[in-house]
Image (cartoon, rainbow, N blue to C red):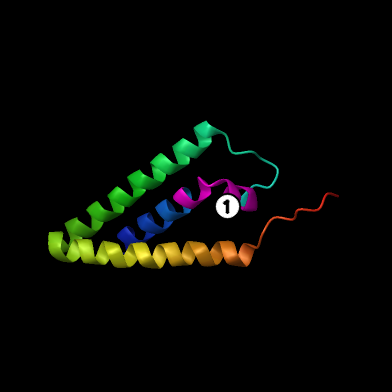
């Protein structure tokens, strides 16, 4: 069960990093190319499917989907809170 949560959390982070704004928050001096964007997004989607598979293997189809949905909600909220704590990138030049 914990493996499903961890996989889902990492996958949510990867999907959020595939967005320009969040990528600039984490890596302010690097630009997000299309290749990086699609790679991050694809790895995130594969992670979500892997998290779903881990939940289904652990609990069966019925409860596995329910647990995955709960893990997805918790992980997306956690990633959103991490970006909120990190703050926005500075727009002023030094």
Write down the residue under mark 1.
22
Identity of the residue furthest to the right in this view: 94
Q: Quadrant of the N terminus?
A: bottom left
x then y, percent, for residue 12: 43, 55
Horizontal side of 77 relative to 61 (left or right) equals: right
Residue at (46%, 41%) from the top-left corner?
A: 40
Residue 68 falls in image quadrant: bottom left
x then y, percent, for residue 70: 31, 68
Residue at (22%, 66%) from the top-left corner?
A: 66
Looking at the picture, does residue 92 appear above or below residue 83?
A: above
x then y, percent, for residue 48: 33, 51
Identity of the residue furthest to the top in this view: 35
Horizontal side of 59 relative to 14 (left or right) equals: left
Horizontal side of 67 relative to 39 (left or right) equals: left
Write down the region rendered in magenta: 15-25
In the structure shown, which secondary structural element does the residue marked by tag 1 occupy? helix
Per the picture, the main secondary structure of the magenta-coloured stretch is: helix
């Amino acid at each position: 069960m914990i493996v499903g949560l961890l996989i889902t959390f990492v996958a949510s982070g990867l999907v959020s990093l595939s967005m320009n704004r969040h990528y600039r928050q984490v890596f302010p001096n690097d630009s997000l190319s299309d290749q990086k964007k699609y790679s991050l997004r694809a790895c995130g989607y594969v992670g979500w499917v892997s998290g779903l598979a881990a939940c289904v293997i652990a609990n069966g189809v019925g409860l596995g989907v329910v647990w995955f949905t709960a893990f997805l909600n918790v992980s997306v909220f956690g990633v959103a809170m991490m970006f909120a704590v990190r703050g926005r990138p500075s727009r002023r030049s030094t």
